[in-house]
Amino acid sequence: PRELVLRGTAAGLRLAQRPVRELQTLRGPGQRLEGATLARANAWLAGSLPAGELLELRLDWDPAGPAGLDLVTGPGEVTTLAWTPADRHWRLDRTRSGRTDFHPRFSASFVAPSAGGGRGVHLLLDTSSAEFFLDDGETVFTALILPQPGRRRVVLKGGEGTAVKSLEVWPLQSAWRGR
């Protein structure tokens, strides 16, 4: 579920999307890191990411050149989100996201423009989907992924000098409690 909002930008009003507030009721105890290098943020993520398959991640950073993240869901399974400042676009690649062999057009990569500068990533992950709200919801990707069950890892990528302003992670409970 999402909310649509009008956001004032330098280019005028823009339509943006964000997860509904009620999803916050599914959050477990969160953890936060502020003011870190990319290497420190990745080390922190390796020890702080929730153990389950359901998670929420918010990242505010200053990417130095091309940047992004890998969502690792199993051996050889990765969904990649990439920011390319030269083209000012985001790319989501699910070609190795898990089971992709059941239809030739399922395994794909998607591109979307963004005026937001690649500075914000909000990820909601469940067992079979990844939702990315990018640059305060100006660009949004929702992708079906069919990974193996198990723990997820997130690896941040970027050029030297990429600064992580803040990084927050929460485990999520299923919305289907008791079913």
Image: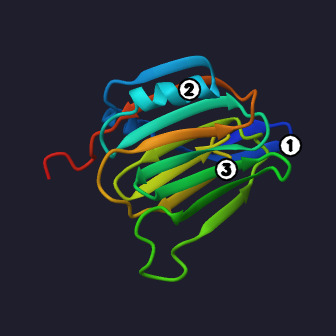
Identify the mark at residue 33; answer none if there is no mark: none
Q: CA distance from mark 1 to mark 2?
A: 32 Å
Looking at the image, residue 24 sits to the left or right of residue 135; the answer is left
Q: Earlier in the sequence, mark 2 or mark 3?
A: 2
What is the spatial separation of the Cα atoms under label 2 and label 3, in whole angstroms? 17 Å
Task: Of the two numbered discs 3 and 1 on the same chain, state the one appearing first in sequence.
Answer: 1
Residue farthest along the front direction in this orientation: 75
Residue neighbourhood size for the residue with mark 2, other residues' Cα within 10 Å, grouped as few (<14), some (14–19), many (≥20): many
Task: Please tell me whether residue 2 is drawn above or below residue 96 in the rendered image.
Answer: above
Q: Kindly tell me whether residue 28 is visible in this rendering.
A: yes
Q: What residue is shown with label 2?
A: 41
Query: Given contact means CB atoms under 8 Å apart, are the residues at marks 1 and 2 in contact?
Result: no
Residue 82 image position (x, y, % from top left): 67, 50
Q: At x 41% / y 52%, what residue is drawn? A: 73
Identify which residue is drawn at 57% across, 23% down: 40
Q: Residues within 10 Å of mark 3 (few under 14, many from 20)?
A: many
Q: Position of residue 100 (x, y in %)?
A: 45, 72
Circle 1: residue type: Ala
Picture quadrant of residue 164 = top right
User: According to the image, label 3 marks what residue?
Assistant: 82
